[in-house]
Image (cartoon, rainbow, N blue to C red):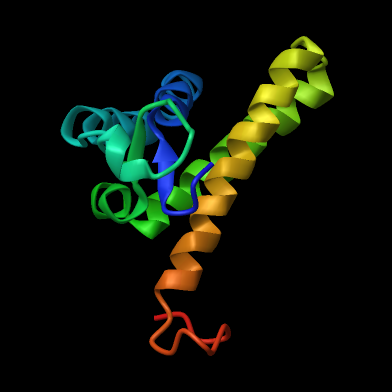
């Protein structure tokens, strides 16, 4: 996935996974889905064909704190699914990839929020 973009499909999937057990987070995702406009394909400069959202615009709609809560909630759902063994392996793999994409967004936030981009210990 391009580094400065987040897949709109991942937002939709996260909404579906969180809507029953975490309705406030799901509502935040729904608002973001309704308000964000996908990046034009020509602006992606990549072969990725799915609808992508700019990380910077996504973060304006979902604060870093909400994104952290999404990562935590999806991780807990994944852990529960592994413990209960109630999902097919393919679904577990999709959930793992989804969590990894949210974690990559979190890392992007950390890398782009430092006052001194050369100092990876400073997060402002």
Question: Which quadrant does the C terminus fall into?
Answer: bottom left
Q: Is residue 89 left or right of residue 14?
A: right
Is residue 52 positioned above or below 59 on the image?
A: above
Asked if residue 86 lies left or right of residue 11, the reply is right
Q: Provide residue 55's location: percent of width, then percent of height.
A: 36, 51
Residue 35, compared with residue 63, is above or below; it is above
Q: Residue at x 32, y 53 (%)?
A: 59
Instruction: Choose between 74 and 36: the one closer to the eye.
Output: 36
Image: 33 above or below 44: above
Q: Position of residue 61 (x, y in %)?
A: 24, 47
Quarter of the image where one finds residue 79: top right
Residue at 44% from the left image edge and 30% from the top image edge: 22
86 w.r.t. 82: above or below: above
Task: List x then y, in percent, for residue 23.
Answer: 37, 27
Classify the position of the N terminus by image quarter: top right
Q: In the picture, residue 100 is in which quadrant?
A: top right
Q: Residue at x 47, y 22 (%)?
A: 13
Badge count: 0
């Amino acid at each position: 996935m391009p580094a400065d973009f987040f897949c709109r499909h991942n937002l939709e999937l996260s909404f579906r996974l969180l809507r029953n057990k975490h309705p406030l987070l799901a509502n935040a995702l729904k608002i973001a889905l309704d308000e964000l406009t996908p990046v034009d394909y020509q602006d992606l400069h990549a072969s990725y064909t799915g609808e992508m959202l700019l990380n910077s615009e996504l973060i304006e709609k979902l604060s870093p704190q909400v994104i952290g809560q999404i990562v935590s909630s999806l991780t807990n759902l994944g852990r529960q699914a592994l413990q209960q063994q109630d999902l097919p392996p393919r679904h577990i793999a999709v959930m793992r990839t989804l969590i990894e994409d949210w974690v990559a967004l979190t890392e992007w936030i950390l890398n782009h929020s430092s006052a001194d981009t050369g100092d990876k210990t400073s997060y402002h």
